Image (cartoon, rainbow, N blue to C red):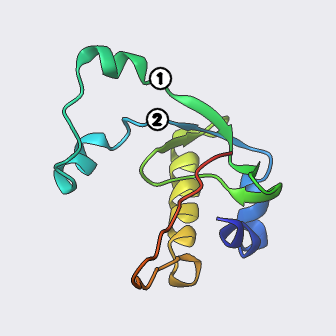
Amino acid sequence: MHLGLDTLPQALRDAVEGRSAEHTYLAKYAELQKRSPWRPNLSREQIAQVKPVVHRSCARIGNGRKALFVSEHFTTRVIGLPEDESRDLLQALFDHSVRDEHLYRHEWREHDLVFWDNAR
C-alpha cells in the first residue's frame, strides 16, 4: 500500500490525507465466509468483542513510510464525511489499491516462505 499511496492522483490524495476511517472485522464477514468456508461462525460473545476501530487512512507503518491504510473488506466509512462522499472516496481508494501494478503475486518455488507483515 506504499505504492498505492505514492501513485494516488493528487486530488484523491488531498481528499484522504489527514483523514481517519472506521474499520471493522465484521463489515463483510458473512460474504467472506461464503468464499472461504474455513471461517467459523462467530458466537454472540465473539461478535460483541469485535468493536470498530478508527485509524488514519494514510499511516506510517513498520518501516516508517506512509502507506494507504484502507481495505475493501474492513474499512466502512471515512470519519467526518457525509455517507455518500465517504462511500465514493472509499470506492475510489479501493479501486486504485487493487490495480494490477499495485498487487504482489508470488511465483512459488520449492522452499519458499512468505510472510505478510500486517503490523502498524
Q: Secondary structure at mark 2?
A: loop
Residue 60 is left or right of residue 87, and the answer is right
Amino acid type shown at disc 1 = Lys
Q: Secondary structure at mark 1?
A: loop
Identified at 73% across, 56% down, the residue is: 15
Numbered label attached to residue 24: 2
Mark 1 packing: few (<14 Cα in 10 Å), some, or many (20+)? few
Identified at 45% across, 54% down, the residue is: 72
Position of residue 46 measured from the top left corner of the image (x, y, whole percent): 32, 20
Q: Quadrant of residue 93?
A: bottom right
Q: Label 1: which residue? A: 51
The number of numbered discs placed on residues in the rendered structure image is 2
Amino acid type shown at disc 2 = Thr
Numbered label attached to residue 78: none
Specify the farthest residue to the right.
64
Residue 32 is left or right of residue 12, and the answer is left
Front position in the image: 22 or 48: 48
Question: 107 above or below 43?
Answer: below
Q: Do labels 2 and 1 touch, CB within 8 Å?
A: yes
Position of residue 26 measured from the top left corner of the image (x, y, whole percent): 36, 35
The CA span between labels 2 and 1 is 7 Å
Position of residue 25 measured from the top left corner of the image (x, y, whole percent): 42, 37
Residue 49 is left or right of residue 64, and the answer is left
Mark 2 or 1, nearer chain start: 2
Of the 4 image quadrants, the one containing the N terminus is bottom right
Position of residue 111 measured from the top left corner of the image (x, y, whole percent): 43, 77
